[in-house]
Image: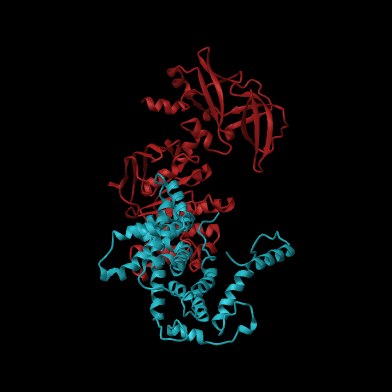
Amino acid sequence: MVVVRLVNVTKVFRTGVVGVKDINLTVNHKEFMALLGPSGSGKSTTLYLIAGIYRPSSGKIFFDDRDVTNVPPKDRNIGLVFQNWALYPHMRVYDNIAFPLRIKRLPENEIRKKVLETARMLRIEKLLNRYPWQLSGGQQQRVAIARALVKEPDVLLLDEPLSNLDAQLRISVRAELKRLQKKLGITTIYVTHDQAEALAMADRIAVINNGRIIQIGAPEQVYTKPATVFVGGFLGNPPMNFVEGEIIEDKGKLYIVIAGQKIISPTHYEPIVRRRGLRKVIVGFRPEDTMILPECRDRNECVKGMVYAVEPMGREYIVVADLGGELVKAIVPRTLVLTDDQEICLCPSLAKIVLFDPKTEKSLESLAAEKD
Amino acid sequence: MSAGLRDIELRSRKTEILIVATVLIFSIPLILSYSLLVLSSFSKEMVTNLNPRDFIPTLRNWILFFEGRTAVFGGIRVNICHIVLNTLIVALGVSFLVTLVGSMTGYAVSRLRFSGRKKFMALLMLLHAFPGSVMVVGIYFLYLMFLPSYQMVRLYSFFFVIVARASLEVPMATWLMKGFFDMIPWEVEWAALVDGASRLKVWRKIILPMVKPGVAAVMLFGFLAGWMDIIYVRTFLVDQTLATWIESNINAEYSYLPLVAAAGTFYLLPTIIFFLLARRLIFTISATGVKG
């Protein structure tokens, strides 16, 4: 039953480096929140602030209504899994998992019961007598999770727990971890730099860059309606395409000129563009929302481009197209046969285009929301 | 971690034999002098002239040694148990103090980023480079300030020796322990803190077991330093230790050298035991627990 709340939290390290700045974040009870950002963005700092390993320079942290800003980590009842798992190398797996309970001075038979129960849940009951260095990466990671869960924490904090696993294992553990979290119903905060992990597992994603939270939202929302150019470019593989566009008006209708070719402006953006009197925009569109046609004819939402390269990815092909000197990507079915330097027609789906303000790099929607 | 490949297989068999042979040649003087000492202790005459006829096997030297006799004739007798005990007190005292101070300083230097840390480490290195004998006079004047009453001097002199000798060993011990602490990732400590342990518990239950080989090494080095010391013991200790006893018997008018050889051999025992233990203790360093 724990809601984690960060209010205006700032962390400036003694060296003067700003870890995070003015973070406001609420993680609801039973929610799986992913903190997503590139390395050095402050996502791990945020996690360590919640864990109590770092103390905020200013701002407050609440677990429900309890102010834990100055509470040491041992009194916060949290489970923490590190990227390198940080198992105690001189203890057997059993003692590793039992360690938090022994610190609490629980009776040994109760410890035994809880350790076995947790080990069974994570399917490591056969490894209890081994030392950490006798385990594979995946097994070590399970032990680390077991050690975090055995004390029945109020909040589970995971710091890139999958990034030391090989790619195959990472994907299989992903679903398992998600299920486990839902089953146990523990408020979970998960730090990752892998956008696929965040999209796959989280209830909500908080995108962090340069120590600030840029956008918080459900995976679909963050993916389809990125608040800034950074978010659009960080999520998705391949990420969102961005091209510069110029707004012109012709016979009462708005058009965007991309690479000297005009397409009609998405109608839902028209009021915002007019109100702000924008002349220039950044047009963002996802590769999978882009159709490729052999010829444009007279379609007014398409632009001509050239095939730069084709990357066969097995399930689909990625077409890299040259659009007036800028490279954009589109995902097309395998049936489409294209050759290099062939002229093609790119048609981004108008409903899914996102327009950004070139000055602030924020999407026009989020700019409009800021004003209100 | 497990047995198997010992080293990169780059050297050929021939160069390996060559290397071992060179090492053997250079260690001949050492091996020779020590074996002569041990042989002499079991002989009526010293065998140091390399004359095999000098070797007349006997256990008498050892019996005399344990009886505490300093000469074959005459009634000069010392309590040898007392001397060994004195030596042990000094050696264990130095060992304890060096381990305590060295490990804690090493931890601080490894973990805390205080200003002047690098300079402090360099200073420690410099301190280690100073020969211990040049500081005897300074330490003597320092101790004059803490001179106890006449009856207590004998007891205090042990503290004087232990503290002075330990302080010479602390710089090296700090460096050694710092290396061991550097291998422990922060996350392991944090994990224990999050698991509910206090700082002190983390130190005792997590950190200390992980640096066990380092602690063992520092303990042994400290012990040997105390066991071997002669300058400080002669200067500050009222009682005798094995080192000063042997030294005073070499030049005495009544000195009987095969007996001194037996004492010398006995004096070597900790070193031999240390050699046997060290292979197990120092070289089986446990992994730091971080994979990948």
Relative depth, front residue between A348 and B84: B84
Please say if A204 is above or below A285: below
Q: Is residue B101 left or right of residue A224?
A: left
Question: On the image, which quarter does residue B192 sit in?
Answer: bottom left
Quadrant in which the N terminus of chain B is drawn: bottom right
Q: Quick check: B257 above or below A283?
A: below
Along the line of sight, the residue nearer the viewer: A32 or B227: B227
Q: How many marks?
A: 0
**Residue A322 as seen in the image, left or right of residue A77:** right
Q: Name the spot of residue A249 as percent of width and height, x first.
A: 52, 14
Vertical relation: B219 (above or below) B119? below
> Horizontal placement of B134 versus B42: left or right?
left
The quarter holding residue A117 reads bottom left
In the figure, B249 relative to B19: above or below?
A: below
Image color mode: by chain
Q: Nearer the viewer, residue A139 or B239?
A: B239
Nearer to the camera, B179 or B244: B244
Residue A65 is situated, as x and y percent measured from the top left of the image, at: 28, 46
The extreme front residue here reads B253
Q: Is residue B56 visible?
A: yes
Which residue occupies 72% across, 28% down? A341
Q: Which chain is cyan?
A: B
- Residue A34 in view (yes/no): no
Q: Position of residue B25 (x, y in %)?
A: 67, 67
Q: Residue at x 47, y 41 (%)?
A: A36
Tell which chain the image draws in red: A
Residue A293: where, in percent of width, then height?
66, 28
Q: Quadrant of the C terminus of chain B?
A: bottom right
